[in-house]
Image: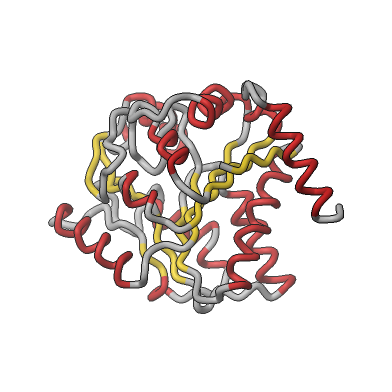
Amino acid sequence: MRILIEKDYDAMSGRAAALIAEEIERNPRLVLGLPTGDTPVGTYERLVHLHKEAGLDFSEVKTFNLDEYAGLSAEDPNSYNRFMWDVFFGRINIGPAHVSIPKGDDPRPDEFCRRYEEKIKAVGGIDLQLLGIGGDGHIAFNEPGSSLGSRTRVVTLAKETIADNARHFGKKELVPRSAVTMGVGTIMEARRIILIASGKKKAAVTAQFIEGPVTSMIAASALQLHPSVTVILDEAAACKLRRLDHYRWIMTLEEERAGK
């Protein structure tokens, strides 16, 4: 697991966007897994800028989103589908046929989840998966206790997740109680993973998933078992890492080798 520590949210977002852009330039047909939430917004803004100002081409990129609230249509203003098109997809040159987002209002959700898994396999799997992390250690909507081998499925959201997301709905009573999400096992099949975390509120769980035991109670801890994970943190999110000085030392050596 490679740990990169940046000064602040903007620098963290810039580093993540630069790594994603490098992968797209290396492989224009990249299959990219994407999250929603507050943390990746800065990364999406940087990628939009690279598209508009530097010609970063998304025309052949295919994307798969991690999750969607159950019961919400794609047009619902609180849906993750709407979020992604407003914040990212609608501002780059990617066609709707190349965008895949879980359908929250499918009348046969279990069948939809099976097809979503098949669709990922049909394109050869996810090349690069971008992740955020919840305050309880969840990735996508894999709440504490989720099987580390889980696949795309419908899950019940934890009370903490509902409370955290209430600000987007006005009050927690309006937040859906369940969601469609990629499983931990699905995420772990991505060839490369980038996880971003920002802010002091994420510091404790960040230290747990990086330096603590692998446990289903912290779904992100499964990433310790993946062969190619880069974690990008800002200073605040990194402040509780026990081996913080060691991670900084490795970054210094990498920069020296790169001639920076």
Left or right of residue 129, residue 107 in this image: left
- Number of callouts: 0
Is residue 202 positioned above or below 67 on the image?
Answer: above
Left or right of residue 260, residue 97 in this image: left
Left or right of residue 205, residue 250 in this image: right
Q: Quadrant of the N terminus?
A: top right
Along the line of sight, the residue nearer the viewer: 180 or 83: 180
Identified at 67% across, 41% down, the residue is 4
Identified at 53% across, 31% down, the residue is 210
Q: Position of residue 171 (x, y in %)?
A: 39, 30
The answer to whether one can see residue 252 in this image is: yes
Q: Position of residue 219 (x, y in %)?
A: 38, 34
The answer to whether one can see residue 170 in this image is: no
The image quadrant of residue 178 is top left
Identified at 27% across, 36% down, the residue is 147
The image quadrant of residue 58 is bottom right
Q: Position of residue 10 (x, y in %)?
A: 71, 45
- Residue situated furthest right in the rendering: 260
Along the line of sight, the residue nearer the viewer: 242 or 115: 242
